[in-house]
Image (cartoon, rainbow, N blue to C red):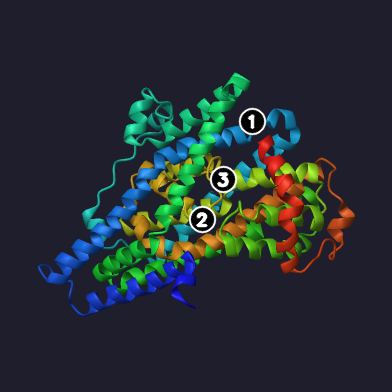
Amino acid sequence: MRRENMGLTEKVLWSMGLGIIAGLLINLGGFNAEGSFVNDYIVGGLFYVIGKMFITAFKMLVVPLVFFSLISGVFGIGDIGKLGKVGVKSFALYMMTTAVAIAVAIGIASLVIPLFSAPTAAAAVFTAKEAPPLSDVLINIIPGNIIEAFATGNMLQIIFFSILLGISLLMVGKKAESIAEGVEVLNEAMMKMVTIIMATAPVAVFALLAKAVSELGLELLAQLAVYVIVVVAALLLHLLGTLMLLFRFFTKLNPLIFLQKMRDVQVFAFSTSSSNATIPVTLRSVTKRLGVDNSVASFTVPFGATINMDGTAIMQGVATVFIAQLYGVELGILGYLTVILMSVLASIGTAGVPGVGLIMLSMVFVQVGLPVEGIGLILGVDRLLDMLRTAVNVTGDAVVSTIVAKSEDELDIGVYLDREAGSVEVPEIDDEVEEEFAEVVHRAEEKA
């Protein structure tokens, strides 16, 4: 494969491997001795500067991204009254599955990671802020000064204000449409900024991992392996356990048929790492393969791509436990509840594009007092995990769509039970999906 034809994922994986090799050579070769040229000018100079600039760029995007995306997200569910029970059921199920996902992830990570991981040398140079009492957390959700909240990056206050502003603009009605359009444009611009910064990820991954491995050696690699295994285990448990149990409980249908018919969608989501890019394929499978009426699917699928981030929530839960353990930080029950709350609220406005999950993770780290620099340690493996969690996200969209359709008597059981219904070859899906569903997606987005 020629270098210019490599995708971002391949470049990041190559950079990760080269960074690990470079770090091990420095560590095992004894070149990281204090006062040496390599340690002072390469590791502590070049690698440190590149990594720090990349992490700072992520922090720069957090406040505007959350602000604009949440307002857009509120507008996206603004017709929930007109759509009645379908909108209410969809919203409740998406929020519930996200909360369950991150709670399960934190539970698994809290049990497994401490068994195989211990605080590293990083713990000696980082002191976490003391956790405030629960009463202060609840009171401080409401900002006394929104300018101060934006300036200091108080994300709970920014989230509260953004949702309240979005609801207020909806209540204003037609006069606020121009503002809504402007916010949507700004939100799209922020997504482009994420894309631009992620384009520099290969260089940043090399620098961050080379620096970390040169300082911590094989110990860090062993702990990263534990992190990856726990994330994958939590994703599989949520996909095959939580989602399938909910599906069976609410629909009384065979989950194995559902998984068989969703295989193409999951593969497509895995390859694109984007819930939004997978919308046309998801819509086709949900309507033609599962038998959900288009009147339901045209709302629940785009809606889910906007607010349903189960896989991302799982990553945030495991990453929080992992980095807290690595830095020797005790978050406690209040810290974990804060992570759950913020992940659920942030999922309302999180765009379904690659890389945004890391922005949301940095927001969570800041709120619970963890170093944002810790993201650099997991960045190298995040692209691969991003592909897996996107497959979980789109599966959740289809589960909720089927549950809602069944409850509204809008599910064709005959189509669902017919294992060959709507079955086509993958290349044919690619050719006909855009023509068949582009107009449906456009109408759904206009409604939202």
Q: Are marks 1 and 3 in contact (CB under 8 Å)?
A: no
Under mark 3, the amino acid is Ala
| Image mark for residue 102 | none
Left or right: where 161 falls relative to 217: right
Residue at x 75%, y 34% (from the top left corner) = 85
Residue denoted by label 2 = 354
**Position in image of residue 323 (x %, y %):** 37, 56
Under mark 2, the amino acid is Pro
Residue denoted by label 1 = 78
* Helix, strand or loop under label 2: loop
Q: Are marks 2 and 3 in contact (CB under 8 Å)?
A: no
**From mark 2 to mark 3, how far is it between C-alphas?**
21 Å
Mark 1 surroundings within 10 Å by alpha-carbon count, few (fewer than 14), some (14 through 19), many (20 or more): some
Q: Earlier in the sequence, mark 1 or mark 3?
A: 1
Q: Nearer the viewer, mark 1 or mark 3?
A: 1
Q: Are marks 2 and 1 in contact (CB under 8 Å)?
A: no
Residue 190, above or below 162? below
Residue denoted by label 3 = 99
**From mark 1 to mark 3, how far is it between C-alphas?**
22 Å
Residue at x 48%, y 50% (from the top left corner) = 356
Q: Earlier in the sequence, mark 2 or mark 1?
A: 1
Mark 2 surroundings within 10 Å by alpha-carbon count, few (fewer than 14), some (14 through 19), many (20 or more): many
Residue 130, above or below 214? above
**Position in image of residue 93 (x %, y %):** 66, 43
Residue at x 46%, y 43% (from the top left corner) = 190
Left or right: where 388 falls relative to 442: left
Image quadrant assignment for residue 146: top left
Q: Nearer the viewer, residue 343 or 271?
A: 271
Residue 246 visible to an observer of this rendering = no
* Helix, strand or loop under label 1: loop
